[in-house]
Each structure stands twice: as structure tokens, then as C-alpha cells.
């Protein structure tokens, strides 16, 4: 690989990694400012629980189909310009949200979250597509891990800074800080527009033509998928028997995906069904159960999973890249997350810190699921595959927050574990 090619791909990785920091920061801003935001809006507690959950539901609604459509468009017309436009939409969405907070208008806040959802999720698809295009299979999970790790620092900053800004200054100030972070991320993304020799660089990095690029092992010791399998070996459904014309159509691309891809989508729904709804209520949960009237301590403790995952994701990606065992990792992640959610839900722990540490480690290996997609889907279909997986995940996420709100209203002290069941289902599915 040429020196310029090596430098270029790491510069592009730095740009795409920083680009989603803002989206991650503002995604959980309502949850991080949970109690102060409730006091600021001065709405009924039951109404507020549904309003808070709807901020996440309306974020997910456009992404039931949009990332899939954007992924298909990226495969056909290119990714970088769409990537930057989507990140601009993220900043515009947060601008509307901040205006809504200032005016205490839930409608304007919902509009901002809707625009944020349109931009952020599809930008994540574009980020994965760009990264996959620049990195060969040997370093792909590491590169995707760096992407996620950097973005998760946005979540960590939000967990720490937003409650402090809301408490020390005001809730509107915390919302405007989120807007500044989103604009900074947008500016950082502009480097991807610089003309790059992406096609030739990717060929050098991969070390072979697309037709005989080797794939990383998904599991070891069981003989299912091993190093040296080619794309054709791993995709019996994508052979010369499939009509070429059909594979080029919108529906043809979907039907050409192997069974393993759909299994991964089910795992994503189960895992993120455990992670994201918990993030919606964990600030209030920690304050009610462990840190009454101490939102600052609660905000510091709730940042533990995001902080650990931000640090460990590149390492976990590198480990999986070179050792394989992805299926085993997914089973362990599901089992550990299920146990932790159960212990938190039934109140058997005197402190949540150890449980949150386990969650942080498990979160860091969730990238394994996404890193499997380029191994089982053709390179020319990657954006469509990432988009479809994101769409399926968001379809579930449009429902889960409202389910959590109903439970939160009915069971004020959160005495049952809303997400533990989904997490345990995830561990079973991975088996």
C-alpha cells in the first residue's frame, strides 16, 4: 500500500468518526436532562413521561424506511455528498429543538427530533459505507470500532455536561450547547468532500480484487466460517444462478441477501431494544433508586457504560478482527446484559456501578454485529444492507420507548425490568 493511500484512509476515518459525535451528543440530551427538563416544561409527570419517550419515537419513525432508501441511493449515486447534507440536517434539527426548549413548545421540540432522526441515522449508514470502502476486511472491525468509539465520546460528554449545564445555568443553555457540538461535527465532516482516490486505495488496502477478497472468520473452532472463505463460499445465494438483472433492482437487492443477514437484523433488534430504551430512562432510574435528589452524581454514574464502550470499542474490534469468534461474543454479550438488567430491575444491588461496568463492556462488543454485515453481503450492496438493518432496528425503536413510558407511568419506582426481557431474548437468539 502506498504511503499516500495509508494516510488518506486514516484522515477519512478521522473525519467520519468526528462527524457523528454531535449526533450522539444530542440524541440522549433529553434523557440526560430528564428531571431538569421536566421542571422547565412544567407539565404533568405522566404527560412528561410520554412526551420524553415520544422524542425518541419520533426520532425513529422516519428511519423505518429512510436509511434503507438512502443506502440504496448511496450505492447508486455516491455517498460523501449525501453524508455531509445529512449532518447539516442534524444541526438544523438540534437548532429547532433548542428553539422549542426556549419557547417551552413540545411541538417544535418534536420537529427538531424528527429532523435529527432523518439526518443522524442515515448519516450512520453513510459513515459505515465510507469506512467499508476505505478499509479492507483485515482492519474493518477496528475501523468501525474507532468510528463508534469516537461517536460514543459524544454520549459521554452529554451524560456529564448536559446535566451540569442544565443545573448550573439553564435547560435552554444545555440545548444550545448541543447545537454548538452538532455544528462542530458538521464542520469536521467536510474533509470527506476533498477528492480522494478511494477506488484505487481500496483495492490496494484489500490486497485483491473484489472477486477473491478473503473474509475474516466469524467463528473459530467450529468450521462454520473460517479465514480463507471467499465471498462466493459464504454466499451460496449469490451465484450465477441468480439473475443479474434482478440483483440490480431495488427488490432484487433485498431478496439476494443471505439468511445470515436477516438473523443479524433480529439480533440487532433484540440488543438495541435492551440498550436504547434503558438509556432513555436511566437518568431518572438512577436518581429514584440510588441517588435521590442528586442529579450530578447520577449523571456521572450513568456515563460509565458510554465511557467504557468508547474506550473499549476499538480494542474489541481489533480482537474480533484477528481472533474471530463473533457468534460466541454475541452470546456472551446477550447473556451478560440480561443478567445485569435483571439485577438492576429487581433491586438486588446496593450500588449500580459494577452492573454499569458490565454493561459498558457488553456495549463495546455490539460493534461485532455491524462488522459482520460486510462479511456476508457483497461490497456493491453494503450501503443498502447497512440501511436496511438500520431501518429494521428503527422500526422496533419507534415502539419500545412508548412501551417504556407506559411502564414508567404505571410503575413509578421502576420495580420491574423493562429491558431485561428483550436482552435475554437477544441472548437466546444469538445461540
Image (tube, rainbow, N blue to C red):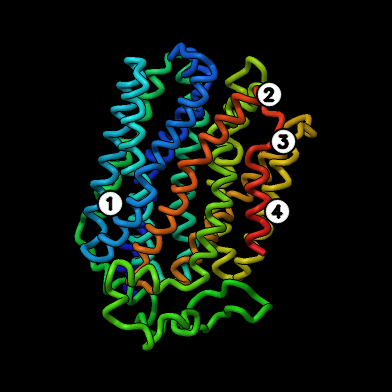
**Do tag 3 and tag 4 residues touch (Cβ < 8 Å)?**
no
The earlier-in-sequence mark between 2 and 1 is 1
**Residue at mark 2 to residue at mark 3: CA–CA distance:** 12 Å
Mark with earlier residue (1, 4): 1
Disc 1 crowd, CA 10 A, few/some/many (<14, 14-19, 20+): many
Name which quarter of the figure residue 144 lies in: bottom left
Residue at 39% x, 49% y is 64
Residue 229 rendering spot, x and y as whole percentages: 51, 83
Q: Closer to us: mark 2 or mark 4?
A: 2
Residue indicated by mark 1: 83
CA gap between label 2 and label 4 equals 25 Å
Q: Toward the viewer: 389 or 306?
A: 389
Q: Which of 262 and 21 is in front in this view?
A: 262
The residue under label 3 is 344
Q: Which mark is residue 274?
A: none
Pick whichever of labels 2 and 4 is earlier in the sequence.
Answer: 4
**Residue 84 point in image, percent of width and height:** 25, 48
Label 4's element? Answer: helix
Q: In which quarter of the image is the C terminus?
A: bottom right
- In the visual, does 63 lie left or right of 411? left
Q: Neighbour class for label 4 at 10 Å: few (<14), some, many (≥20)?
A: some
Which sits earlier in the primary sequence, circle 3 or circle 4?
A: 4
Q: Look at 59% across and 64% down and name the residue there.
A: 319
Residue on which the image places disc 2: 413
Say whether residue 4 is left or right of residue 350: left
Amino acid at each position: 500500500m502506498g504511503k499516500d493511500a495509508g494516510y488518506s484512509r486514516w484522515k477519512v476515518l478521522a473525519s467520519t468518526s468526528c462527524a457523528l459525535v454531535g449526533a450522539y451528543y444530542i440524541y440522549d440530551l433529553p434523557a440526560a436532562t430528564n428531571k431538569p427538563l421536566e421542571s422547565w416544561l412544567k407539565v404533568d409527570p405522566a404527560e412528561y413521561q410520554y412526551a420524553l419517550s415520544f422524542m425518541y419515537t419520533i426520532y425513529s419513525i422516519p428511519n423505518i424506511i429512510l436509511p434503507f432508501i438512502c443506502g440504496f441511493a448511496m450505492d447508486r449515486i455516491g455517498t460523501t455528498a449525501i453524508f455531509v447534507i445529512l449532518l447539516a440536517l442534524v444541526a438544523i434539527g438540534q437548532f429547532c429543538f433548542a428553539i422549542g426548549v426556549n419557547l417551552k413548545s413540545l411541538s417544535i421540540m418534536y420537529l427538531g427530533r424528527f429532523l435529527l432522526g432523518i439526518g443522524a441515522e442515515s448519516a450512520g449508514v453513510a459513515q459505515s459505507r465510507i469506512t467499508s470502502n476505505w478499509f479492507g476486511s483485515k482492519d474493518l472491525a477496528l475501523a468501525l470500532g474507532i468510528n463508534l468509539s469516537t461517536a460514543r465520546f459524544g454520549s459521554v460528554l452529554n451524560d456529564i455536561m448536559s446535566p451540569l449545564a442544565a443545573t448550573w445555568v439553564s435547560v435552554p443553555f444545555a440545548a444550545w450547547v448541543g447545537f454548538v457540538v452538532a455544528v462542530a461535527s458538521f464542520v469536521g465532516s467536510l474533509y470527506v468532500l476533498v477528492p480522494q482516490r478511494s477506488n484505487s486505495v481500496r483495492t490496494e488496502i484489500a490486497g485483491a480484487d473484489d472477486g477473491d477478497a478473503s473474509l475474516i472468520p466469524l467463528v473459530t473452532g467450529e468450521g462454520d466460517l473460517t479465514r480463507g472463505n471467499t465471498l462466493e463460499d459464504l454466499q451460496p445465494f449469490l451465484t450465477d444462478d441468480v439473475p443479474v438483472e434482478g440483483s440490480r433492482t431495488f427488490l432484487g437487492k433485498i431478496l439476494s441477501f443471505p439468511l445470515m443477514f436477516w438473523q443479524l437484523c433480529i439480533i440487532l433488534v433484540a440488543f438495541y431494544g435492551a440498550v436504547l430504551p434503558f438509556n432513555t430512562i436511566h437518568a431518572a432510574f438512577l436518581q429514584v433508586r440510588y441517588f435521590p435528589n442528586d442529579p450530578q452524581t447520577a449523571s456521572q454514574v450513568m456515563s460509565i457504560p458510554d465511557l467504557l464502550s468508547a474506550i473499549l470499542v476499538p480494542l474489541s474490534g481489533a480482537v474480533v478482527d484477528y481472533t474471530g469468534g463473533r457468534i460466541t461474543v454475541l452470546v456472551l454479550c446477550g447473556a451478560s446484559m440480561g443478567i445485569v438488567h435483571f439485577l438492576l430491575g429487581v433491586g438486588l444491588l446496593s450500588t449500580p456501578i459494577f452492573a454499569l461496568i458490565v454493561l459498558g463492556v457488553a456495549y463495546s462488543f455490539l460493534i461485532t454485529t455491524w462488522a459482520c454485515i460486510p462479511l456476508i453481503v457483497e461490497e456493491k450492496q453494503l450501503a443498502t444492507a447497512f440501511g436496511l438493518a438500520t431501518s429494521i432496528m428503527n422500526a422496533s425503536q419507534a415502539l419500545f420507548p412508548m412501551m417504556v413510558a407506559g411502564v414508567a407511568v404505571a410503575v413509578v419506582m421502576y420495580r420491574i425490568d423493562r429491558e431485561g426481557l428483550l436482552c435475554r431474548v437477544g441472548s437466546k437468539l444469538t445461540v
